[in-house]
Amino acid sequence: MRRKVPLLSLGILAALFLLSFLGPFFYTQDPYTFHKDLILHAPDWAHPMGTDRLGRDLLARVMEGGRASLLIGVGSAVIASLIGLVMGVTAGYFRGWWDKGFVFIVDLFLTFPTFFLLLTLVSYIPASSLILIIVISITGWMGTARLIRSESYRIASQPFVKVLRLARVPTRTIIFKYFLPLLAPIFYVSFTFGVSGAILAESGLSYLGLGITPPDMSWGSILSDGKAVMEIAWWVSFFPGLMIFLVTFSLIQISDWLQDRANQRERIGN
């Protein structure tokens, strides 16, 4: 059965991006201003998401933190997916010692669980959005690379690729004209999973105090700030947690749809 286009998930993602990047132009509360008379103020019309334990407007902070979380998620996924694409195609197409080197590097990275490797790296590097993008990318490319390598093996074994090689078609032409279009579905699926995984990784690090540090903020750091007052002010942790859930849920739905489309094309091709 063909899966329908996840319009709801696409709409949620679009709404969250608009809220984070365009919302501050319309909702002009300052996310950094303290209000001593509004400490842990419950949500109302003036402050739709309430305030935190320093009286700062939570909606303004969620919008400000959303920009950091989404930029880290998308930036990390782009870099990790491109690294995985290059590594996977190189290993699957050229094979030989390229493939042996690939297996060695992947095994080396997988010696430690990814999140603990991430924790180790950020423990010695002052965290910022750029640093987190680089660190999450370095620790998050292996899954994409293994999928790309496996599919590249299959494509390289196809008769038309052997004919192209015999005809001495340049390697660059074979890869860019024939390999990459066939690898695109896997790349897109890995990218969408990578965005959600990077946002969750950043949120986990910020929750542990190793991610974005004040005065900067992200959804994870805002969520962490609310854990001390969760029993008396549920909204401080609820709303940033809801944002993380909505992004992750929407991206998983889109990934499932892309994977379903890729499987259908493969069945038709066979």
Image (cartoon, rainbow, N blue to C red):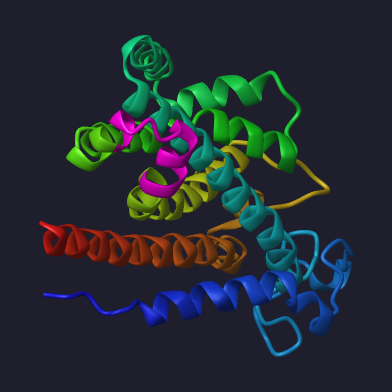
Relative side of 144 to 166, left or right: right
Relative side of 214 to 258, left or right: right
Predominant SS along the magenta part: helix
Q: Which residues are magenta?
A: 164-178
Viewer-closest of 258 and 221: 258
Percent x, y for residue 114?
43, 27
Task: Name the residue rendered at 37%, 35% in the picture.
Answer: 143
One can see residue 220 in this view: no
Percent x, y for residue 215?
83, 48
Tell me the quarter of the image containing the N terminus. bottom left
Residue 222 placement: quadrant: bottom right
Task: Name the residue rendered at 13%, 64% in the picture.
Answer: 268
One can see residue 82 in this view: yes
Percent x, y for residue 209?
65, 36
Tell me the quarter of the image containing the C terminus. bottom left
Task: Name the residue rendered at 65%, 33% in the picture.
Answer: 134
Relative side of 44 to 8, left or right: right
Q: Is residue 182 magenta?
A: no
Relative side of 159 to 168, left or right: left
Residue 87 placement: quadrant: top left
Farthest residue in the front direction? 167
Viewer-closest of 259 and 97: 97
Q: Is residue 23 above or below residue 168?
A: below
Task: Name the residue rendered at 71%, 68% in the picture.
Answer: 63
All told, the count of numbered labels is 0
Q: Is residue 177 magenta?
A: yes
Q: Is residue 89 above or below residue 81?
A: above
Viewer-closest of 239 and 111: 111
Viewer-closest of 194 and 225: 194
Q: Is residue 106 above or below residue 19?
A: above
Percent x, y for residue 219?
62, 56
